[in-house]
Image: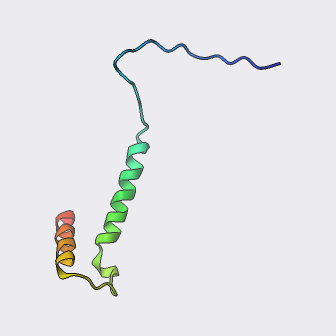
């Protein structure tokens, strides 16, 4: 015999969608992005990296702006 399921009636809303996210749904991706950005911008760990001086200069400027 199948079990009966009880569903809550949803009010009929027209024109608006109510979507609620938990706080960590936005905090975790932002934290992961910040951590990866810090890892990329840390030139002390890039001993063997050689590249275009313009790109290196750009990354140094971004790092200076982030650390202010």
Question: Percent position (x, y) of residue 40?
Answer: 32, 70
Rendering quarter of residue 36: bottom left
Residue pictured at 43% horizontal, 37% vertical? 22
Figure coloring: rainbow
Residue pictured at 28% horizontal, 78% vertical? 43
Q: Does residue 46 lie above or below 33 as drawn?
A: below
Question: Percent position (x, y) of residue 4?
Answer: 72, 17
Residue pictured at 35% horizontal, 70% vertical? 39
Residue pictured at 65% horizontal, 16% vertical? 6
Question: Percent position (x, y) of residue 32?
Answer: 39, 57
Depth check, front residue: 55 or 31: 55
Tell me: 44 left or right of 52: right
Depth check, front residue: 26 or 59: 59
Rendering quarter of residue 13: top left
Numbered-mark total? 0
Q: Quadrant of the C terminus?
A: bottom left
Q: Does residue 66 lie above or below 29 as drawn?
A: below
């Amino acid at each position: 015999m199948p079990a009966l399921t009880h569903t809550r009636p949803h009010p009929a809303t027209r024109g608006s969608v109510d979507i609620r996210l938990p706080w960590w749904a936005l905090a975790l991706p932002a934290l992961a992005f910040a951590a990866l950005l810090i890892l990329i911008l840390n030139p002390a760990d890039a001993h063997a990296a050689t590249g275009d001086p313009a790109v290196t200069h750009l990354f140094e400027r971004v790092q200076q702006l982030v650390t202010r």
